[in-house]
């Protein structure tokens, strides 16, 4: 895994090597093993390498014929592609997937990305066509940011590298901050910074460096057209085969590989499948909190470790770690996204990086296979509506009131959310109901000042939400929710995964995020995927001969909750008050101090309101007050 920087001066002015190096140095931790740069006329390319594949000859920037690339990620099917390209007459001088990428581009042009199975972000320069290509993988596993203003096109793996360029200012995008207050991520390609955007997953840019024309293309999206021809047994057989093959491909490495193991279904399945295929025993890294059994999944993880014949490392983050690291983690994130689970993820990654260079994780399982408890909440209402009105919005009864009853214990911990959700708007259209389910503030904006609240354009925000939610081929509520979470929520989760691991020089691979898996599952009839409102139903059936029943039948999956409400009672209150009630924060005019005071005293056990406020203020302190977050 690596970090990249690239720029091209539109006026053809020679690139300044000192600027290129300054930008690359901001993200040196992403690639501690090796570095390289190329300055050629108006072009500047720099690379920081974490060596995982082809340790000796994989240095970047790499050039084949008249094309040069800087690349972050891994093409998991590079060996198969290398063989295919060899049959087409291509010859190779290294054992790296980077060289395979270049030959694939030379053979297939921009369509090369359609041949890749992996996580990748790259920028290449084609001297023959005088064009730049910048691409990001199917799910957004690897980040790529772009800034076009003044006299240059700029690209980087992280925003902080762009801010090191003298032509880029750290200016606030207030609409993005308002997005974050609702979703705890920013919709679309915007960021917290004006004029800096992220290339969306599954897309690439083509820039003609002579004319200045820029074209953005989508090379992949899920098709939710339902396959009504094949049987349940066919889908299960295909699913089992793809799960095994995805793990097989992602175990490819020239350095030791471990897993991050929570004890939940997804990471447990990945760990056990990896243990079957790994040439050496795995090391599994599990994080938990000692404050309460409600924040400790180690008993489940230990059972998986025993079955896998693996070595276990259990890590217990503490409140003091939270206080010591949070500001720095906000810096690594570039912009707020996701929940407080990023803190223990970082602590676990830091420990793992001392033992291995690569870990497999279970990220993406909730999005592909439908694992969020809010899906049960949504369908409880749908089933109740159908039973009362004797109608069905979806054309077929995916979940009936009778069939959902055995799966309602999954909602036991969500009583406060249910009270809010059922308070008003009962039986509203699907989009309106799901918007309310994912609103992290549950519609409450009392903690913000009147001036900040006045800047919300609720109609526009809802329209942007609906542009993703109302996918034309997602006829069922279930597929609409899954599609939305894959396109809007998952990239934020993957941003956390990338930043918290790369901050430690650790490569993290999401074995369930294989495009073949996602395409298959998207085609399965929703009634098979979500039978009776059973979360991840089809995955449980496919994994039944791999996972122990104790994991398969869990009703208490936690995610990675952080006991902030307990810490507030035991020393964290002063830390939060110093940040959110400081003179600088008050003068910023975003938060209402009296409302913040009340929230500090009354935050819910699993609430994320305080977390959101902390991140917004710490981001301003680091990136705006310090003019770009300079170290």
Image: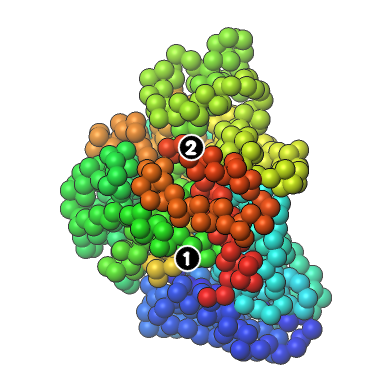
Q: Where is residue 343 shown, x and y percent of the image? A: 42, 55
Q: Which mark is residue 328?
A: 1
Select label 1 or label 2 by which is in front. 2
> Judging from the image, what secondary structure is the residue with disc 2 in?
helix
Q: Mark 2 points at which residue?
A: 602
CA separation in Å, label 1 and label 2: 27 Å
Residue in the foreground of this view, choosing between 572 and 486 = 572
Position above or below: 586 against 547: below
Location of the N terminus by quadrant is: bottom left
Residue in the foreground of this view, choosing between 197 and 370 = 197
Please tell me which residue is depicted at 38% across the width and 51% down the height of the picture.
571
Q: Where is residue 238 shown, x and y percent of the image? A: 41, 42
Q: Earlier in the sequence, mark 1 or mark 2?
A: 1
Q: Where is residue 534 shown, x and y percent of the image? A: 41, 28
Residue in the foreground of this view, choosing between 466 and 602 = 602
Number of other residues with Cα within 10 Å of mark 2, as a class: few under 14, some 14 to 19, many 20 or more: few
Number of other residues with Cα within 10 Å of mark 1, as a class: few under 14, some 14 to 19, many 20 or more: some
Position above or below: 28 against 529: below
Residue 244 is left or right of residue 21, and the answer is: left
Please tell me which residue is depicted at 44% across the width and 39% down the height of the picture.
606
> Judging from the image, what secondary structure is the residue with disc 1 in?
helix
Please tell me which residue is depicted at 53% across the width and 40% down the height of the picture.
599
Does the CB distance between marks 1 and 2 fall below 8 Å? no
In the rendered image, which quarter is residue 325 located in?
bottom left
């Amino acid at each position: 895994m690596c970090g990249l920087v690239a720029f091209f001066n539109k006026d053809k002015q020679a690139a300044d090597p000192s600027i290129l190096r300054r930008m690359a140095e901001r993200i040196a931790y992403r690639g501690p093993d090796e570095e390289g740069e190329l300055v050629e006329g108006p072009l500047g390319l720099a690379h920081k390498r974490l060596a995982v594949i082809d340790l000796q000859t994989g240095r970047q920037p790499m050039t084949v014929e008249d094309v040069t690339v800087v690349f972050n990620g891994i093409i998991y099917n590079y060996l198969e592609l290398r063989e295919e390209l060899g049959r087409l007459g291509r010859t190779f001088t290294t054992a790296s997937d980077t060289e395979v990428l270049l030959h694939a581009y030379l053979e297939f042009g921009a369509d090369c990305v359609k041949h890749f199975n992996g996580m990748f972000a790259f920028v290449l320069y084609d001297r023959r066509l005088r064009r730049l290509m910048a691409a990001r993988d199917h799910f957004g596993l690897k980040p790529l940011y772009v800034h076009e203003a003044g006299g240059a096109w700029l690209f980087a793996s992280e925003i902080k590298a762009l801010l090191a360029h003298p032509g880029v200012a750290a200016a606030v995008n207030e609409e993005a901050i308002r997005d974050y207050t609702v979703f705890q991520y920013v919709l679309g390609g915007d960021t917290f910074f004006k004029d800096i955007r992220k290339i969306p997953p599954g897309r690439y840019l083509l820039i003609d460096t002579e004319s200045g024309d820029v074209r953005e293309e989508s090379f992949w999206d899920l098709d939710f057209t339902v396959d009504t021809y094949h049987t349940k047994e066919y889908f299960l057989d295909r699913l089992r085969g793809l799960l095994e093959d995805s793990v097989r491909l992602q175990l490819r490495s020239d350095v030791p590989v471990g897993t991050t193991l929570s004890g939940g279904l997804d990471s447990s399945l990945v760990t056990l499948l990896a243990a079957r295929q790994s040439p050496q025993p795995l090391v599994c890294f599990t994080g938990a909190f000692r404050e309460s059994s409600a924040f400790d999944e180690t008993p489940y993880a230990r059972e998986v470790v025993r079955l896998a014949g693996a070595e276990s490392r259990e890590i217990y983050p503490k409140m003091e770690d939270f206080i010591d690291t949070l500001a720095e983690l906000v810096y690594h994130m570039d912009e707020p996204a996701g929940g407080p689970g990023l803190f223990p993820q970082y602590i676990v990654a830091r420990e793992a990086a001392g033992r291995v260079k690569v870990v497999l994780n279970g990220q993406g399982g909730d999005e592909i296979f439908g694992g969020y408890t809010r899906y049960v909440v949504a369908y409880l209402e749908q089933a109740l509506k159908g039973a009362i009105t004797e109608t069905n919005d979806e054309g077929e009864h995916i979940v009936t009131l009778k069939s959902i009853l055995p799966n309602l214990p999954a909602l036991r911990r969500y009583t406060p959310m249910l009270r809010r959700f059922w308070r008003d708007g009962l039986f509203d259209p699907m989009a309106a109901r799901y918007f309310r389910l994912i609103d992290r503030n549950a519609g409450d904006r009392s903690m913000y000042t009147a001036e900040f609240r006045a800047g919300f354009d609720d109609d526009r925000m809802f329209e942007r939400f609906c542009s993703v939610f109302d996918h034309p081929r997602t006829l069922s509520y279930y597929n609409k929710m899954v599609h939305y979470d894959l396109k809007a929520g998952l990239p934020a989760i993957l941003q956390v995964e990338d930043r918290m691991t790369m901050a430690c020089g650790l490569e993290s691979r999401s074995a369930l995020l294989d495009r073949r898996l996602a395409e298959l599952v998207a085609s399965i009839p929703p009634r098979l995927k979500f039978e009776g409102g059973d979360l991840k139903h089809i995955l449980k059936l496919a994994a039944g001969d791999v996972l122990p029943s104790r994991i398969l039948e869990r009703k208490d999956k936690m995610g990675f909750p952080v006991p902030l409400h307990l810490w507030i009672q035991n020393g964290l209150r002063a830390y939060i008050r110093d940040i959110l009630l400081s003179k600088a924060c008050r003068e910023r005019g975003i938060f209402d101090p009296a409302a913040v005071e009340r929230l500090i005293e009354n935050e819910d056990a699993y609430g994320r309101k305080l977390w959101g406020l902390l991140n917004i203020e710490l981001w301003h302190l680091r990136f705006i007050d310090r003019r770009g977050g300079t170290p």
